[in-house]
Amino acid sequence: MEDVVQANIRAKDAKNAAGEVFNIAIGSSITLDRLIRVLQQIPGATIDPVYTDAYSGDVIHSRVDISKAEWVLGFRLEFTLEEGLKRTVQ
């Protein structure tokens, strides 16, 4: 969450960011199972996954390209996925 806030502050102050769209993410892939395991390790987070068959049109794999935010905004991740989720839950 804090990385997203910092990206927004950077976008507000960046000279050539007006009207542009930026991807803000961890910049790497993660499986749903790993995400669930990470969340299950965080005190206060409760998650009980229910697995079903995929729907037509479901996105199976995705990875967000954050290079534009890095280049234009000078965006750099400061928190790992685990730390960011822990802070968000708290």
Image: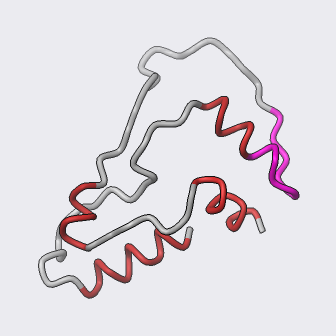
Which quarter of the picture shows residue 24?
bottom left
Image location (x, y in percent) of residue 68: 21, 59
**Residue found at the far bottom of this picture:** 13
Asked if the magenta segment contains residue 65, the reply would be: no
Image location (x, y in percent) of residue 88: 68, 65
Image location (x, y in percent) of residue 5: 47, 76
Image location (x, y in percent) of residue 33: 67, 29
Q: Residue at x 39, y 49 (%)?
A: 27
Q: Residue at x 61, y 31 (%)?
A: 32
Looking at the image, residue 71 sits to the left or right of residue 24; the answer is left
Magenta stretch: give its range: 39-48
Looking at the image, residue 40 sits to the left or right of residue 12; the answer is right
Q: Residue at x 43, y 77 (%)?
A: 6
The front one of 25 and 21 is: 25
Q: How many marks?
A: 0
Q: Which image quadrant: the C terminus?
A: bottom right
Looking at the image, residue 24 sits to the left or right of residue 19; the answer is right
In the rendered view, would you say 18 is above or below 88? below
Q: Residue at x 19, y 65 (%)?
A: 71
Looking at the image, residue 79 sits to the left or right of residue 12; the answer is right
The front one of 43 and 48 is: 43
Which quarter of the picture shows residue 1?
bottom right
Asked if the magenta segment contains residue 47, the reply would be: yes
Q: Main secondary structure of the magenta part?
A: loop
Which quarter of the picture shows residue 16?
bottom left
In the rendered view, would you say 81 is above or below 40? below
In the rendered view, would you say 29 is above or below 20? above
